[in-house]
Image (cartoon, helix red, strand yellow):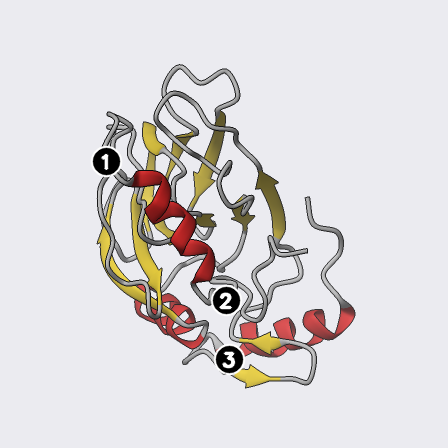
Amino acid sequence: MRGAIPQEACIASTFLQRSQQGVYNYMTKPKFKMANVRCNITIEKYQIPRYAHVPNTSLHGIPVIHYKYAFPKPTDADKIEDVLRINSWTPSWRYTMYTDSHFHSTTHEALVVISGAAKILIGGDGNPDAVTITANTGDAMFMPAGVAHRLLKDIGGRGWGAGEGFTMIGAYPVGGEEWDMCYGRGEEGIEEKVKKTAGLEVEDPALGGDLEGED
């Protein structure tokens, strides 16, 4: 779990939240790329070992990252997509999460909840080391290549401009927009593809700058 957000970031956060009444104000500071920084953000990281035909984080060591309270409510999907673009991520879709466990072998994925809440299983069905998280409106997630995830339960909740139920923005890093669907059924060439993603230049989708998981 991440410690306290630096004071410089908190000052910038106050300015950013004030500007959200209209549009996001993008700033670049010497130490921080301030596309989106919030003082109350809580960050949790997970390393999940291989299970059956699902590599999870075993091949590259890049953690799953859950950013709680990454974006303020009510959420504005268009503005969140702007933040993702500033942080070098390409928004691709707005939808819920599939109930079938799946992963992507060719790229990493950023997910931002724009309405509702859900229980999400990360690591694969039957995996004793799998993790279940609760993702709420305004939360963001970083799913590294190879990590299985699925919707366990749509908790519901009134949407903020995106309708009822659990809805997310899905985005992929610039230069890694081509994503595939894998289900841990022994698909060929998975390990090689996942290993190649270590060469992708990835910025932190929620905070900007270096990826939070890269210590």
Tags 2 and 3 in contact by the CB under 8 Å rule?
no
Amino acid at the residue labelled 1: Glu
Residue in view at x 68 percent, y 55 percent:
215
Residue in view at x 27 percent, y 63 percent:
177
Placement of the N terminus among the 4 image quadrants: top right
Q: Name the N-terminal-most of marks 1 and 2.
A: 1
Q: Nearer the viewer, residue 129 or 87?
A: 129
The disc at residue 19 is: 3
Q: Which residue is mark 2?
A: 203
Packing grade of label 1 (10 A; few <14, some 14-19, many >=20) is few
Tag in front: 3 or 1: 1
Packing grade of label 3 (10 A; few <14, some 14-19, many >=20) is few
Tag in front: 1 or 2: 1
Where 70 sits versus 12, above or below? above
Packing grade of label 2 (10 A; few <14, some 14-19, many >=20) is many
The disc at residue 188 is: 1
Amino acid at the residue labelled 3: Ser
User: Percent x, y for residue 188?
Assistant: 23, 35
Q: Name the N-terminal-most of marks 3 and 1.
A: 3
* Location of residue 155 (image quadrant): top left
The disc at residue 36 is: none
Q: Is residue 110 visible?
A: no
Q: Is residue 213 visible?
A: yes
Q: Nearer the viewer, residue 139 or 189?
A: 189
